[in-house]
């Protein structure tokens, strides 16, 4: 029995599509029948330099599979380039159905040492880049009365990590952006969701390997290949996920997660209103059991990848 491919006849744009998770998603989209625009400036992990090679290589891989693809080395932080990328997709393939905002850079440093440039560069690529391409695609999606966004967030943002204030702020900003798009564009049959991926890629290759324990941790991480992320991204971009929007998912090796989103968990009220003293004596105790501990992602995901 021949089943139709999940993305047959659809067109997807994948940013950061030349390497790592983006490459795996681009290839996964193509394997399910999508034509893919592979956007990658070919920069270093820290965001410097440019190389047309990675995007072009992925296009060649997709074409070798019998698929259709187009490379773009336009930088997503330039305001006009979102429009250009969308226009290129529509011009070449006639439509646009999915945007995967995956491109990112890292500038890890402890907060009290973080420079303005380290802050703004990371925000620019992750958050501004996601906005600019999403906004450009929104016009097309609205005209077509349909479309899907898949944005990459991170448990570094959702939970926490050391030395990543810029990255955490950007990744939490993306959660808000995704939710806003889901609400504002629901009437046009447009969906927007986030994935927090765990994968061994350039983004995690800087993990220390000095002790045996660290080496074992890295070994476990290396099982979590970027290819593990692709199936969830492809499903979210497809019509099979037509009723799923505004959600946050995670992938860790062979496990998929659905994350909770902030909602009130406790309340306390006082009939005559609060004073600072009453907050200290009443509210603090009432909330104590519900306070979220200062954990990092690795404190929450303590078990070995399944």
Image: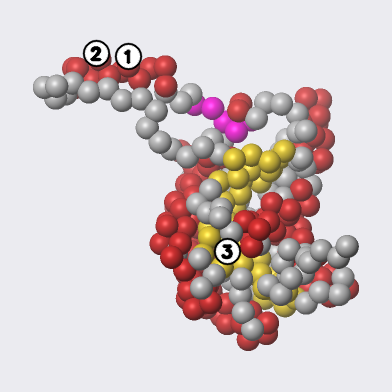
Query: How did the renderer colour the structure?
Result: secondary structure
Q: CA distance from mark 3 to mark 2?
A: 48 Å
Residue in the foreground of this view, choosing between 34 and 289: 34
Q: Is residue 19 left or right of residue 238?
A: right
Nearer the observer, disc 3 or disc 2? 3
Q: Residues within 10 Å of mark 3 (few under 14, many from 20)?
A: many
Tally of numbered tags? 3
Q: State which quadrant residue 86 falls in.
A: bottom right
Using the image, tell me which numbered label, if any, was put on residue 281. Answer: 2
Q: Is residue 225 above or below residue 130?
A: above
Q: CA distance from mark 1 to mark 2?
A: 7 Å
Q: Nearer the viewer, mark 3 or mark 1?
A: 3
Q: Residues within 10 Å of mark 1 (few under 14, many from 20)?
A: few
Name the residue at the bottom extreme. Answer: 91
What label does residue 148 carry, if any? 3
Residue that numbered label 1 is attached to: 285
The percent coordinates of residue 28 (x first, y second) are: 77, 61
Per the rendering, the mark at residue 58 is none
Label 2 residue SS: helix
Determine contact: label 1, label 2, CB under 8 Å.
yes
């Amino acid at each position: 029995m021949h089943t139709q491919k999940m993305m047959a006849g659809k067109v997807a744009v994948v940013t950061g599509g030349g390497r790592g998770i983006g490459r795996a998603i681009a290839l996964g989209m193509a394997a399910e029948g999508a034509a893919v625009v592979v956007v990658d400036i070919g920069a270093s992990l820290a965001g410097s330099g440019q190389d047309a090679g990675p995007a072009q290589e992925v296009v060649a891989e997709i074409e070798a599979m019998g698929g259709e693809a187009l490379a773009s080395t336009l930088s997503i932080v330039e305001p006009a380039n979102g429009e250009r990328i969308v226009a290129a997709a529509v011009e070449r393939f006639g439509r646009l159905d999915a945007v995967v905002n995956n491109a990112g850079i890292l500038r890890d440093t402890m907060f009290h040492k973080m420079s303005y440039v380290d802050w703004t560069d990371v925000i620019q690529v992750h958050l501004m880049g996601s906005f600019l391409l999403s906004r450009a695609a929104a016009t097309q999606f609205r005209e077509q009365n349909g479309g899907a966004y898949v944005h990459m967030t991170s448990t570094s943002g959702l939970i926490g990590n050391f030395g990543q204030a810029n990255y955490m702020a950007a990744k939490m900003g993306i959660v808000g952006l995704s939710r806003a798009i889901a609400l504002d564009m629901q009437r046009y049959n447009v969906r927007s969701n986030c994935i927090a991926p765990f994968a061994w890629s350039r983004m995690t290759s800087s993990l220390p390997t000095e002790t045996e324990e660290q080496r074992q941790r890295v070994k476990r991480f290396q099982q979590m290949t970027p290819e593990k992320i692709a199936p969830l991204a492809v499903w979210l971009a497809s019509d099979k996920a037509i009723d799923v929007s505004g959600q946050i998912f995670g992938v860790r090796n062979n496990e998929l997660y659905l994350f909770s989103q902030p909602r009130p968990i406790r309340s306390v009220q006082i009939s005559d209103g609060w004073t600072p003293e009453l907050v200290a004596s009443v509210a603090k105790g009432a909330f104590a059991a519900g306070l979220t501990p200062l954990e990092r992602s690795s404190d929450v995901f303590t078990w070995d990848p399944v």
